[in-house]
Every structure is written in structure tokens, then in C-alpha cells.
């Protein structure tokens, strides 16, 4: 496993938003990587910085007010953070592609599906003939399991259902064989039965095309079913990362533990649900100590003054908690 | 032993589709098409279904926020559908609603105290001092503090706003609360807080809930009985234990199988539904589910199945169980 190539390697990424009330660090020096052909899940609640992370990788952070202020985003050893807008445009859609939460708003309502797919193809394959482009577009629609692909090319987005639109979005993202696909809450706006279809499609495409996927979601069920490894984010930092089994069976950070316990599981009925007290902090509001300390059940003095680092909690398992550091110390 | 608090019979809502300058009616969207169920005193009835199945329209019709096209709603022995507007307004003292979006359902220009006091003013309850007193008491009941009373909704987080929404619903001491997706806009950790609060309030204040949601895990957690809706019809109604352990309707089975389980070791049967939900303006004939049902027979295309009891506390609308019923 460890010999697998790190396709996307993010090092100490920091993204800051310069607002009227001062600079807000939305993503605070996070490091993670995506292996070739794997599905990495990034989980967290609203405001934890998971979406800003994905936008930073795509070079799509709205500027101003946002900016990548530190760190490297290495894709095949090329640093995306240092590229100019023009250079980035050549990479976006070709090497890294993205699908968004709202399939309703991310397609242009005034152009046909065929038109929009062809645009994405021509942009990166300028020499292709019209026929070639057309054929590729139809091939992609078939690949994502859409029926009557030829007729669909002439349809407008409003003629399709939510699930079909998300399939079109996936087709469009994969049209240039990207190395990494970033999916930001791709199934949140969909019904469960349609969500199951889209997740199955994404897993199937991942095994067939070996496209690495970075799946951003708040739904732990989706993570458990699709991802190999998981990064848990809280208040702009990574608090834990491990294999999907370790995250669910042996979570080390109190936040991860609390999060897993607060999900009502359909399979059994619990009398009372565990809940993490307090609220998700606003980005940039906590500066000293562990950011989870105000809500943590195991908080002790050190947590409020010192900022914990990521400590090793097992093989390829890290957690940002002093308890983990102490436990590891005992073992050694 | 327990009494029926609310009885819904053959409730329908058909929205007209209008076209042209004379607004000629060219069709109907059958949002809710003949739904019947009882709600017992002190229980929580969950209603689940995917978007467009009519669960929210049903909830609103119970309070007549949307006028039903047909059918009866009997609350505490009184037929709500026969009441005049003024009588209905008074009846709403006993039935209150909690909405999905805590951002849109609170007036941004009113302080929390004003928001909470309003139902009492509308229903002419108490003196000014008494009302103020009640506002303070309820703020504490839902886990907020007295100093929150003079703040505005934008100063609160999503979870806190939903607490305010719940407090507002409780102001008139209602018997029944209809909660329409009360936690779906909230983060997981906050969702658990609000669910626990709702359960605790139910015990303390002897409330009855109708809990409308699309999240099957949440519904199982909070409900005593659950009804599953598909295209304007209730296809299955059972105790929550029975429904989740032994779903009978093919749609319920598929719906439960589609929910991602937060356990990487869990192996589930794959019964994936093909296709999308048909349009409610042109629903399929017979059983509306026959177009997506893996067990569809010839009879399903012609005959509409009725919701009938298969075993104690478990009713289903599906032709697969016609034989079981005749045997009983």
C-alpha cells in the first residue's frame, strides 16, 4: 500500500480570506495526499474548510477576497499553487476536474447537453474534428449510464432529472480523462435512491478508469460506503486521517468519535442519541489551544493553551489530540 | 388504551396546471392522492419519502395551510376541514408547526422575544407580564438563556434558531406538533442535539409529533410508527420496529437498501432502483410504483392497491400481499 504513488500531494496548504473584519484563515496549513486510483473522503461539518480545500486545489478560490497564502499543491510534482491563471486553465478540466453539489445550477440552462460537453472536449483537444468531438461526447454519456445518448445531446438541462444532470456533470468532468476528480458533495441534493445510483457509478468508474477521486461530504454513511481513506476536518484543520476501517472502528480524536456517535443508525434504535455540546466555531474564531477544546468531553488544561499537532495513532493513522500523543508515549 | 388524536381520511390535493391567457386548466398535479392514517395521542408518527412524494403537502394540509381538495381531517373529535377560517385559526392553538429552514421561518426584523410572544398575542392569551414570563420560561426549556430574548435571529447559529422555532411552536401549549424536516438543514452534531431536545420535550409536555423527513435514520430514531409515501400515496404504514426490520413493500425495501450505512464492514443486499420518480402530473396507472418495481405483475398496471393490514401494526399497499389478506 505504502508504495503507491502519491498523485496529488498537498503540503501545508493555507487559504486565507481577506474580509473587512480582517484576515480569516479558512484552511490552516493542512497536508494530505491522494494515491493513484484511490477514493479519498474528506469529511467535516459546515465551515470546517472542506470546500475551500477543494476550491484551492482547483485554483477556483474567489480572489479577492480569498487567496492561497502558503503551501504547495503538487500534482505529479508540478506545483499548482504557483501556476498563472492561464497555465491553470490548461490543467483544470484536463488533469483535475470537479463536480459540484448542485447539478441544477452548474449546467448552463441556455445550451444543450451536447453543446456543453463538446465545449469541454474542444477546449483541451483543439485539433479534433467536429465528428470526433461528437463521438467522444456520446461515448461519455453512454459511459455514465445515460440511456438514448444521441437524443440527449440535443436536450437542455431542464429536460433532465436531478440524477441525470449529475450523470451529465460526471461525464463532462471525465471527458478529458483527468487524473484526479474532485467531487464536492455530489449527492447531497439527490434523493437516497438516486444517490445510491450515483455512488455506484462513481465507484464503478473509479475501478474501470482508475481515476483518483477526492470525495468531499458531510455524510458519514457515504464515506463508509465509498472511500478507502478518510480525512476528518474541523475548524480549518485536519483532526484525524486514517483508513476508512480505522476511522469507523477505532476513531482516536474525540471529535471523530462524537461525530460517529451522533449519526442515527437506521439499523438499530438507540434510546438517546449522543450529541456533541456547543456549536461549530466560526472560521478563525479560535486561535490558541486545540480548536475542539470548548466542546470536548476529555478537555484538560494543556488543551486550552497549546495547539496539538498530528500524532501517530497507528499505521497510516494520525490524530490531532494530546491523548493520542500520551498513549503513543506509553507504548514506546 | 391510547386515543386517536388526529384522524386523516382520504386526503387529496390536486394542484391545477394552468396554461394560456385564460388560465385554462390542462391537467392536475396529484401531489397527495388519497392518504389515510391515524395519529395516536403521545406518539410520534414519522412520514418518509423522496422529494415530490407529497409528504410536506400532507403536513400542511393537516393545518389547512394548504386547502385539501378532498378528504377529512378530524382532530380531537372536530372535523377541521369543515371549520370556518376564524374557527380554524383558533384550532391552530392546539396544532403547531416547526419548519425546515430556521433561516427563513423567523422574521429577521423581530427580536426573539417578539417572535415568541406573537402566537400569544394572536390567540389573545395572558397579560403582557404573563406573556413575557412565558417567553423566558420557554427559552430555558429549549436550552437557551434569558439574555437571548432581545437578540435578533441572525445572531444565532442554525441549531439555536431551530430551538427558537421549537419554542415558538410550544408557546400556545399545543397538543400536536407537525415538524417538517426540522433537522435536515443542520450539521450532524447539532442535529443530534435538536432530536434529543424534541424527545425530551415530548416526554415532559406529553406532546404528539408528526415528523416529516427524508432521512430514514433520523425517522427511525424518533418515531413510534412510520408511514412511507410514494407519488402522493402512502404505500406502507407500520410500527418503526416492524418497518425497519421487516419492510414489506418493494419500494420501502429499496429505499432502506439505498441508505448508506456508517459502517465500512456492513455488507448489504443490493436492490438498486432503476430510473427516476415519475411525474405526479402523469402518474403511472394502477400501482404508481409498477414502473420501477422488480416484482411488478400484470395486475399492478391496472388495479390500484389499497393500504391494508397484513399483520398487527403493519399495513401495506401492494398486490404481492393480496393473498395474505384473504387468508386472514
Image (spheres, helix red, strand yellow):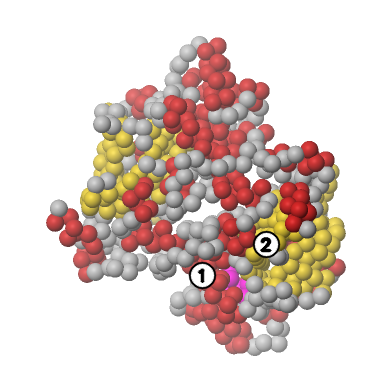
Mark 1, secondary structure of its residue = helix
User: Residue at 66% across / 47% down in the picture?
Assistant: A254
- Relative to the observer, which residue lies in front, B70 or A102? A102
Q: Residues within 10 Å of mark 1 (few under 14, many from 20)?
A: some
State left or right for residue B64 relative to residue B303: right
Which quadrant holds the N terminus of chain A?
bottom right
Per the image, the residue denoted by label 1 is A200
The vertical placement of A36 against B193, above or below, is: below
Residue A66, quarter of picture? bottom right
Residue A219 location, x and y as percent? 57, 55
Residue B259 location, x and y as percent? 47, 58
Magenta segment main secondary structure: helix
Per the image, the residue denoted by label 2 is A242
Are labels 1 and 2 assigned to the same chain? yes
Q: Residue furthest left?
A: B327
The vertical placement of B47 against B132, above or below, is: below
Residue A191 location, x and y as percent? 47, 58
- Which one is earlier in the sequence, the residue at label 1 or at label 2? 1
The vertical placement of A201 against B258, above or below, is: below
- Relative to the observer, which residue lies in front, B68 or A8? A8
Mark 2, secondary structure of its residue = strand
The vertical placement of B141 against B270, above or below, is: above
Check residue A135 in the rendering and tell me which mark sits there, or answer none.
none
Region of the chain picked out in magenta, as a range: A168-174
In magenta segment, residue B164: no
Amino acid at each position: 500500500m505504502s508504495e503507491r504513488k502519491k498523485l496529488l500531494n498537498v503540503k501545508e496548504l493555507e487559504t486565507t480570506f481577506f474580509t473587512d473584519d480582517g484576515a480569516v484563515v479558512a484552511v490552516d496549513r493542512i497536508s494530505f495526499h491522494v494515491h493513484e486510483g484511490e477514493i479519498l473522503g474528506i469529511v467535516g461539518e459546515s465551515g470546517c474548510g472542506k470546500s475551500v480545500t477543494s476550491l484551492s486545489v482547483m485554483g477556483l478560490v474567489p480572489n479577492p477576497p480569498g487567496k492561497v497564502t502558503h503551501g504547495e499543491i503538487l500534482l505529479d510534482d508540478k506545483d499548482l499553487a504557483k501556476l498563472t491563471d492561464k497555465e491553470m486553465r490548461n490543467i483544470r478540466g484536463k488533469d483535475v476536474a470537479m463536480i459540484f453539489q448542485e447539478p441544477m445550477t452548474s449546467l448552463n440552462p441556455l445550451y444543450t447537453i451536447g453543446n456543453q460537453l463538446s465545449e469541454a472536449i474542444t477546449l483541451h483537444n483543439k485539433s479534433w474534428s467536429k465528428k470526433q468531438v461528437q463521438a467522444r461526447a456520446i461515448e461519455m454519456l453512454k459511459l455514465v449510464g445515460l440511456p438514448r445518448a444521441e437524443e440527449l445531446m440535443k436536450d437542455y438541462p431542464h429536460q433532465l432529472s436531478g440524477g441525470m444532470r449529475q450523470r451529465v456533470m460526471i461525464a463532462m468532468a471525465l471527458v478529458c480523462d483527468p487524473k484526479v476528480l474532485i467531487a464536492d458533495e455530489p449527492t447531497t441534493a439527490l434523493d437516497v435512491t438516486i444517490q445510491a445510483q450515483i455512488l455506484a457509478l462513481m465507484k464503478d468508474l473509479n475501478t474501470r478508469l482508475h481515476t483518483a477521486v477526492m470525495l468531499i461530504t458531510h455524510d458519514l454513511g457515504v464515506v463508509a460506503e465509498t472511500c478507502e481513506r478518510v480525512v476528518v476536518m474541523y475548524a480549518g484543520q485536519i483532526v484525524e486521517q486514517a483508513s476508512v476501517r480505522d476511522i469507523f472502528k477505532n476513531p482516536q480524536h474525540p471529535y471523530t468519535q462524537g461525530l460517529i456517535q451522533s449519526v442515527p443508525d437506521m439499523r438499530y434504535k438507540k434510546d438517546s442519541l449522543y450529541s456533541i455540546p456547543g456549536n461549530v466555531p466560526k472560521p478563525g474564531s479560535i486561535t490558541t489551544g486545540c480548536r475542539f477544546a470548548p466542546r470536548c468531553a476529555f478537555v484538560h488544561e494543556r488543551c486550552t493553551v497549546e495547539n496539538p499537532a498530528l500524532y501517530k495513532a497507528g499505521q497510516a493513522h494520525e490524530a490531532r489530540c494530546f491523548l493520542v500523543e500520551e498513549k503513543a508515549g506509553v507504548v514506546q | 388504551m391510547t386515543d386517536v388524536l388526529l384522524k386523516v381520511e382520504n386526503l387529496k390535493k390536486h394542484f391545477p396546471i394552468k396554461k394560456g391567457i385564460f388560465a385554462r386548466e390542462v391537467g392536475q398535479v396529484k401531489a397527495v392522492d388519497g392518504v389515510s392514517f391515524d395519529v395516536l395521542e403521545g406518539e410520534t408518527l414519522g412520514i418518509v419519502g423522496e422529494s415530490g412524494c407529497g409528504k410536506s403537502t400532507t403536513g400542511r394540509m393537516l393545518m389547512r395551510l394548504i386547502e385539501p381538495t378532498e378528504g377529512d381531517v378530524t382532530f380531537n373529535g372536530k372535523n377541521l376541514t369543515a371549520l370556518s377560517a376564524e374557527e380554524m385559526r383558533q384550532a391552530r392553538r392546539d396544532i403547531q408547526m416547526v419548519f425546515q429552514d430556521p433561516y427563513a421561518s423567523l422574521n429577521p426584523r423581530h427580536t426573539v422575544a417578539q417572535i415568541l410572544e406573537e402566537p400569544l398575542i394572536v390567540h389573545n392569551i395572558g397579560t403582557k407580564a404573563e406573556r413575557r414570563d412565558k417567553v423566558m420560561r420557554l427559552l430555558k426549556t429549549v436550552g437557551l438563556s434569558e439574555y437571548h430574548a432581545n437578540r435578533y435571529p441572525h445572531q444565532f447559529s442554525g441549531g439555536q434558531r431551530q430551538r427558537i422555532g421549537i419554542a415558538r411552536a410550544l408557546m400556545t401549549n399545543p397538543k400536536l406538533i407537525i415538524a417538517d424536516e426540522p433537522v435536515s438543514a443542520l450539521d450532524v452534531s447539532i442535529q443530534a442535539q435538536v432530536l434529543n431536545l424534541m424527545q425530551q420535550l415530548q416526554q415532559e409536555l406529553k406532546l404528539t409529533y408528526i415528523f416529516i423527513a427524508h432521512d430514514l435514520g433520523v425517522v427511525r430514531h424518533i418515531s413510534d410508527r412510520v408511514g412511507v409515501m410514494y407519488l402522493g400515496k402512502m404505500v406502507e404504514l407500520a410500527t418503526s420496529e416492524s418497518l425497519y426490520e421487516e419492510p414489506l413493500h418493494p419500494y420501502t425495501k429499496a429505499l432502506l437498501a439505498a441508505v448508506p450505512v456508517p459502517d465500512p464492514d456492513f455488507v448489504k443486499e443490493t436492490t438498486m432502483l432503476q430510473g427516476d420518480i415519475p411525474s405526479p402530473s402523469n402518474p403511472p396507472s394502477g400501482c404508481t410504483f409498477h414502473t420501477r418495481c422488480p416484482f411488478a405483475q400484470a395486475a399492478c398496471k391496472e388495479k390500484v392497491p389499497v393500504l391494508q393490514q397484513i399483520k398487527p401494526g403493519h399495513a401495506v399497499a401492494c398486490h404481492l400481499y393480496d393473498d395474505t389478506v384473504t387468508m386472514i
